[in-house]
Image (cartoon, rainbow, N blue to C red):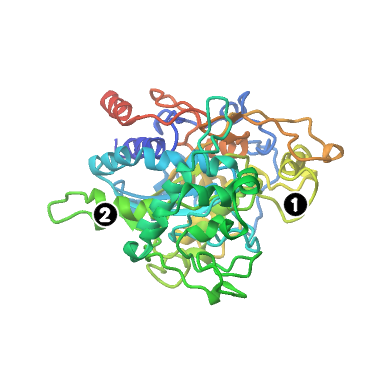
Amino acid sequence: MRLRLIVLFVCSLALLFVFPSCSCEDPEDNQTTEEDVSHDDIDDQDVDPDADDPDADDPDPDADTPDAGDPDDPVSVLPGLDELNDDRLDLLWVLDNAGNMCRATRAFDETMEEFLDLLAAVDLDVNVAVTTTQMNDEYSLEPVARPGYLQSAHQPLSGFDAACSHPLDAEGDPIRSDVSPIRERLQTAVDCTADPSAWADLLDVSDHLLRCAVDVNYRTESCTAEEFQNIDHYFPPLGYCHPFEQECQGEPGVSCTSDDDCDSVYREIPLVLNTGEFRDGSDDFDRTAFAEEFRCMSQVGSRGYGFRQGLGAAVEAVSPELTGGPEAGAGDAPNAGFLRPDARLAVIFLASRNDCTHDGTLDETTNCAQDQCTIQENLGDDGALIAVDTLFHDFLLNFGRSQGWIPDDTTELSAEWEQALASTVVPVAFLGDHQIDADLAPEDCTVPGLEEDSCDNEYALAWSGHRFAQFAALFPASSPSGDLPDIGGGICGPPTDVFQSFQQVLTEL
């Protein structure tokens, strides 16, 4: 019952904070099969066809292998799993921070109260952390994100989608006279500074000046040269040297050559929020304090690199190189203190475009931009994308090494180890509908925008996210797919209150 509660909690938590798009999988009913992974709306080209083939090549004879144990009893395969506490959960959000995410991420604040209700009602000790889909450490427009690193610094700077600055009408066109999305981000940014009173004057910037910053036509017709300013400078300083202006963001006229020349005014937030630290002696949950911290850390901006590599980011985030390994605790490693050896792990992917984790040979400078990812995927083994089953293996390998459940020098996992490790992880993916364009070929790479989007409306601009879905489907407890009552819709639809639906599911269990 406790594992089922964890699975439902993860799905429902994600739903409350993101989109009603999850049909939560009951781990007692779900047995992942080739049919599960290869159903019509998820492309199976990255799933190893020899995964369960008795004629497949034998694993490396020199690799560490466990005693066979009972495949249906993970503890008999990996005795370290005997320490798992079903009251503990480590929860990693992998958030898309690319330019078209502004519409989607507004659902966070809209569902904050339901999320707090859920944390208060469910008796779980939860570690919460955030990373992003960005894996390009040299992309200078994004000031905070680093590949696979946990981040808690507030990042309010948006991309260049008009929806980041203006609401959309029923036809999906921006209402240029309305700059309320900017004002909402400004309010949160000021609240997240160390001294909000010192930056309160930013809340009084006129609509006219904000439109001068973001609306080219309005700027040309209605703004003087003195009134034009980069929109970034209306937000409190991040400690970020703007690469085009060589000025510290938020401090016009303060020149810089690197981020070291600029100071951040945002308050420090722990990289890991533990719900136990927000409960008092009577075990009452401090909703306000948790909300203040998580609202700041979960705003990751939308300046990130367009080639999303969320699966690669998850693989890196749980690696011993970043976690510090099983003895790290709260040590000096970038992600130390997140993973606990007695806790299960949940990973929630929120992405508006397909995963593009590649081997380094993908040309990211071609005319077809992110469509290059689909072209390389369609090339199969000859393409640059790393196969989903390889990422699944590498994720479990890194996770097991970080937890100390397998030797640190392990390079290959036996089928028994892989199955045992997968039983401790619950992945959830929120994506665009699966509209796989299997016909895109290298000769088509002439202009961007070749791939058809899943939706372009007031709720989201999204494309197929099938590689994330394939990854999730390889775990025994996951979403998408599931046999429990449906409490979902899609990333392209409106966020709704699903807390009552979650309670109904628990009642049925």
Give how far across and how far down residue 283 sits, in percent. Answer: 16, 51
Q: Quadrant of the C terminus?
A: top left
Looking at the image, can residue 509 be seen?
yes
Q: Residue at x 72, y 39 (%)?
A: 374
Q: Residue at x 40, y 31 (%)?
A: 26
What type is the residue that disc 2 sits on?
Answer: Ala
Judged left or right of residue 288, residue 83 is right
* Extreme residue in the left direction: 282
Judged left or right of residue 210, residue 284 is left
Give how far across and how far down residue 165 sits, in percent. Answer: 53, 44
Which residue is the site of mark 1? 364
Looking at the image, can residue 396 be seen?
no
* Extreme residue in the right direction: 443
Callout 1 environment at 10 Å: few (<14), some (14 to 19), or many (20+)? some
Q: Secondary structure at mark 1?
A: loop
Q: Is residue 277 above or below residue 253?
A: above
What type is the residue that disc 1 sits on?
Answer: Glu
Q: Residue at x 40, y 40 (%)?
A: 17
Give how far across and how far down residue 347 sits, in percent. Answer: 46, 46
Callout 2 environment at 10 Å: few (<14), some (14 to 19), or many (20+)? few
Cα gap from disc 2 to disc 1, whole angstroms: 42 Å
Which residue is the site of mark 2? 289
